Amino acid sequence: MSAPGQIDVPTPASMPVAGAPGALVAKVRGEPFTELPQDLYIPPDALEVFLDTFEGPLDLLLYLIRKANIDILDIPMARLTEQYMEYVEVMRTKNLELAAEYLVMAAMLMQIKSRMLLPRPAIPAEEEDPRAELVRRLIEYEKIKRAAYQLDALPQLGRDFFPVEVLIEQTLAQRLPQATVADLQEAWRALLVRAKMTQHHRVTREELSVREHMSLILRRLRSGGFAEFGELFDPARGVPVLIVNFLAVLELVRESLLEVTQSEPFAPIYVKLAHAQSG
Amino acid sequence: MPSPDEVKLALEAALLAAQQPLPISELRKMFDEEIGADTLRRLLDELRETWKDRGVELAVTAGGWRFQTRVSVQKYLERIHPEKPPRYSRAVLETLAIIAYRQPVTRGDIEDIRGVTVSSEVLKRLEDRGWIDVIGHKETPGRPALYATTSSFLDDLGLRSLQELPPLEDTAKTLDLTQTPPPASQPAPDEPATAQPSPA
C-alpha cells in the first residue's frame, strides 16, 4: 500500500504558512528533510490499550501526528494512512464495535492519499492541497480539545468554590407565653385533685390476640432461620399467654405459614417459616 | 443620603444573605436609587478590597456580585463533605467547549468538529447542569436546535462574559515552533485564520 516512490509535491499553499525553507528543500520520498522521527509505528497490542482513550478518528489522528512530531501542515499521507489502518484493523480483529466514523475517516485518508499520488501536470495556483480539509479539521479539533482542558481548569462553582450564604431568618420569632415553675406546681396539684374525684376501679383483662402472636412469631422467624420450639414461649408471661401463643403456632401451621419438624420422637422440635424453604 | 460606610455595610449584608449573584441594578433598590451605579461599583470594589485577605471573597460574574469561598481553601472544605462532585468526561467537556466558543451551534456542527456522533446524553448532562440551552432552530432541513451557553455557565465559572473565556490556542503555531522557529513572521499570533494551509 505504501508507495516507496512517492514524491510529495510541495504545494504552493503550504509554503508560506509552514514558513520552513528546510522542510521544502529536503523532501525525499515524501518525507521532509527536518527530523522526521522513525517511531511512527505503534504495536497493535499497545494500540488496544489506547483504544478507549480516543474520542474519535480525529483524536486518533492527532495523537499519531503528535507522537511522530509531524508538521501538521505537511502530513505524510502514506505513512499516516498506513498507521491509521493498522489501528482500524486492530479494532476489527478484536471484534470491537467499530464506530462508523473511523471507517469514514479511513475512506477520506485513502482518497487524499490517492489524490496525492496522481500526477498533477502544471498545478493551477488555486488548486487546493488535497490535505487541506483534513488539516483544517485537525487544527479546529485540537483547538477545541485544548479549550476543553482549559475550561475544565477554570475554578468551578460547586467543585472548586462555593457560594457563601448567610441565613437570615425572615420572619420575626413569635412571642410565646411565659410559664414559671410555680405555674407548673399549681397545675399538677389541680390535676391530682381532679384525678381523685374521678377515680374509679376498672378491671381489665389482658387483650390476648392470637393474630397478634402469629405476627410476633412470623416476625421473629423472618430472618429465615430455625427456632427451637421452646424458644417461642416465655413461661414468665403466664399461662394465658402461653396458651394463646401455642394457638398461634397451630394456626400458623394450619395456614401453611409455619413448618414444624422433629427428626425423631423426643428430639428437639424446630420451627421455621414455610415459604423460606420453598422459595 | 447614607454615608459611604453605611452603604458598604448594607451591600455586604445584602450580598452575604443573597442566594444568587446580585447585579448592581438590584443592589441600587436598597437606596431608593439615589446612589448612582458608578458609585455603587466603586464601593463594591472597596468592599472587595476589604475582604481580600479572608477565606471568603467577593467576586463579580455575569449575574452580578456574590460572596464565594476561596479556591485555595477548597482542599480543606472538601474534608467536611468528602463526596467529590464527579468530573465531566472528555466528550462532555469538548462538547461544552465547542458550544462555548462557537455558539450558537447545532448538533451537526459539534459532530463536524469532534468527528464523532454526539450522544443525546452528553447534551442532556450539560442542559441539566443549566450550562447550555436551546436558543432557537436553524432554518435548514430538519430545523436542528441551536445550542448556546447560559448565564449560569458564566456564573459557575466565575466569568463576567464570554470574552473572558481562555483564548483559543493556535495549534499550528505550537507545532511550528517545535519544528521551525519562525523568524518574526507572525505579527498577529492570535489570529486563528492564519492556521489555514490554503488561503482561500
Image (tube, rainbow, N blue to C red):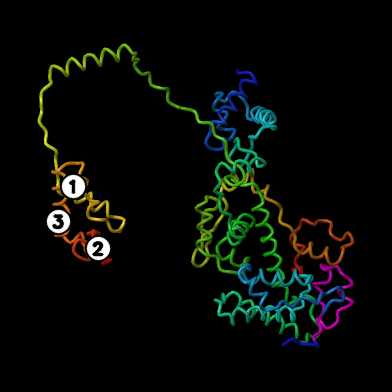
Q: Amino acid at mark 1?
A: Glu
Which SS class for mark 1? helix
Q: Quadrant of residue B182?
A: bottom right
Name which of mark 2 and mark 1 comes first in the sequence.
1
Asked whether the residues under the numbered discs 2 and 1 touch, taking CB atoms below 8 Å apart as contact, a structural biologist would say no
Classify residue A61 as left or right of residue B119. Answer: right
The segment highlighted magenta reads A6-30
> Residue sitting at 64 percent across and 79 percent down?
A106
Q: CA distance from mark 3 to mark 1?
A: 14 Å
User: The residue tagged with tag 3: helix, strand or loop?
Assistant: helix
- Whole-percent x and y of residue B49? 70, 30
Q: Amino acid at mark 2?
A: His
The percent coordinates of residue A209 (x first, y second) are 14, 45
Q: Secondary structure at mark 2?
A: helix
Tag in front: 3 or 2: 3
Taking depth in this image into account, of B159 and A86 the one nearest to the observer is A86
Mark 3, residue position: A250
Separation of residues labelled 3 and 2 (CA atoms): 16 Å
* Label located before the other in sequence (3 or 1): 1
The residue to which callout 1 is attached is A212
- Earlier in the chain: of badge 3 and badge 2, it is 3
Q: Is residue B34 magenta?
A: no
Query: Which quarter shows the N terminus of chain B?
Result: top right
Instruction: Pick the quarter of the image with the C terminus of chain B.
Output: bottom right
